[in-house]
């Protein structure tokens, strides 16, 4: 969707999902828990569930 499309405090490049990706770049102790994504039919946070691996 184009920038400014939603009435939210975040936008393209500045949103919860990009925050998770940035967090993971600097924290090797965590990874995305895809098993949760695979269990849910609908999610408000795809790739937003993390698990600690170390």
Image (cartoon, grey):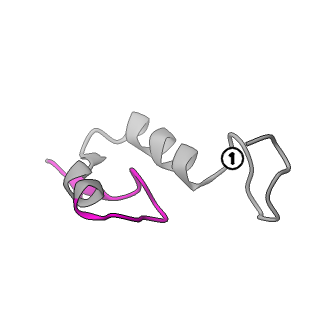
In the picture provided, is 48 more to the left or to the right than 18?
A: left
| Camera-nearest residue between 3 and 39 | 39
Q: Residue furthest left?
A: 54
Q: Is residue 40 magenta?
A: yes
Instruction: Identify the main secondary structure in magenta.
Output: loop
Residue linked to disc 1: 14
| Camera-nearest residue between 9 and 22 | 9
Q: Is residue 44 above or below residue 29?
A: below
* x then y, percent, for residue 3: 82, 43
User: Quadrant location of the N terminus?
Assistant: top right
Give the residue at x 15% y 48%. Answer: 53
Residue range corresponding to the magenta coloring: 39-53
Give the residue at x 82% y 52%. Answer: 5
In the picture provided, is 43 more to the left or to the right than 15?
A: left
Q: Is residue 4 above or below residue 26?
A: below
* x then y, percent, for residue 38: 24, 54
Q: Is residue 10 magenta?
A: no
Give the residue at x 73% y 56%. Answer: 10
Label 1 residue SS: loop
């Amino acid at each position: 969707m184009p920038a400014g499309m939603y009435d939210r405090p975040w936008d393209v490049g500045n949103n919860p999902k990009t925050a998770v990706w940035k967090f993971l770049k600097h924290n090797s102790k965590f990874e995305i828990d895809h098993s949760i994504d695979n269990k849910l039919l609908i999610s408000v946070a795809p790739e937003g569930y993390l698990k600690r691996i170390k």
